[in-house]
Image (spheres, rainbow, N blue to C red):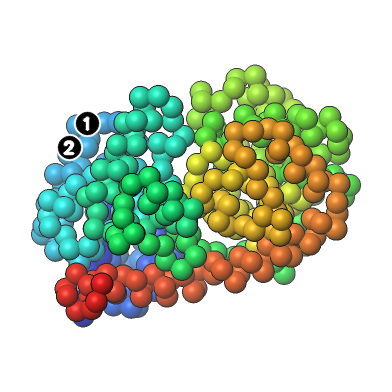
Amino acid sequence: MSKKICFVVTVALAAKNFLQWSFEDMHNAGYDISLICDMDEEYIRSLPKFVHAYPMAMERGVDVRGMQRAIKQMTEIFKREKFDIVQYSTPNASLYASIASKKAKIPVRLYCQWGMVYLGFDGIKKSIFKFIEKYTCKNSTDVQPDSKGNLDFCRENGFYSEEKSRIVWNGCANGLNVSKFDLSKKDGYRAEIRKKYGFSDSDIVLGFLGRIGRDKGFNELMLAFKQLKEKYPSVKLLYVGYNEKPDTVDQDLLRYFDDCEDIISTNGWVDDPQRYLSAMDIFMFPSYREGFGNVVIEAEAMGVPVVVSDIPGPQNGMVDGVTGFKVPAREVLPLVEKTSVLIEDDELREKFGKAGAKFVVDNFDSRVLIKKIIENRDWLIKRSRGECDE
């Protein structure tokens, strides 16, 4: 059967990180692939030749004129191309594409729900973005969160019914690239990065991978590190990420982050996170909200025990008391206590590390996930054509 799919995300970085890994397999499975996002010529040239690129300006944040323009352009494209599936993710792109694909009468309007941005907000802003989330879900024929936790949360809170929602396999937008996150290479990576930043063999390196921002738990991470540093002088922090939202965090803690000699920051993203994760002894992830939190399974893949917030997503990528610990979000003391347990117990760190590596390979291998995704997309198309049972 002919199968036309159009992916829509807000920016090219999201396409690169969460979609592009699947393009070749989907193409080989007979899919005609289109991509809509805010992308420049350099990114377009980097795409496989078989991908039809539609550059479209989609600024982050609220932009009413930009929204109207994007919806109009998308509607025209969708009506002309008559896609079998329009798949959308990320906040702005999902809102625009859900409206445009419904106008264009696309048979499968698939919202891949990679987290809910409103959970990181307060007050009227939270109410507005919660309404947008529900509206996007309502416009969609199908919703697929990337974690069971978010699936259960949204069903319980009336965002969508059981009939129109499901996760594929065990969740996660793009799974784990087991050839990239290869545990057998850990020792070499670890020695390289620890030498690069001057970590000694006796240093306990705590780690984080993500942007600086309030909803990533930056304040809690800094407060916890200050307490841990007082208890354990040999503790260091390796922070892999960039300062995207400096105005959202405590400014005194941000100054501490900048000034503390025992906090090493990459000051930006890295293309080889597996190397940096390998240098860590414990991975800390006190985020307030995530879709899935791929960094958790990436850390585990490199044999690193994790301490993560008990929020939908990250807690679905680990096993509490087996591959690490989960702690209440937005709280400092539990984060300090559970991290201390791991700092003080070398054998437990090693035990959790081995268990974590096995867990993620068994449950999130991207090679298995893409097969499950293609099976699901085939089923969605057949169902829309009345060729299979619900």
Apparent side of residue 50 relative to residue 278 in the rendered image (left or right): left
- x, y percentage for residue 75? 14, 50
The dot on residue 91 is none
Q: Secondary structure at mark 2?
A: helix
Residue type at mark 2?
Gln
Image quadrant in which you'd find residue 318:
bottom right
Give the residue pinned by disc 1.
64
Residue type at mark 1?
Val
Q: Label 2 near label 1: C-beta < 8 Å? A: yes
Image quadrant in which you'd find residue 132:
top left
- x, y percentage for residue 232? 86, 36
Q: Is residue 17 visible?
A: no
Number of numbered markers: 2
Q: Is residue 279 visible?
A: yes
Apparent side of residue 51 relative to residue 345 in the rendered image (left or right): left
Q: Secondary structure at mark 1?
A: helix
Give the residue pinned by disc 2.
68
Q: Residue furthest front?
A: 156
Apparent side of residue 328 relative to residue 109 in the rendered image (left or right): right
Graded by Cα atoms within 10 Å as few (under 14), some (14 to 19) or many (20 or more), the crowding at tag 1 reads: few
User: Looking at the picture, does residue 18 appear above or below residue 367?
Assistant: above
Q: Nearer the viewer, residue 320 or 199?
A: 320
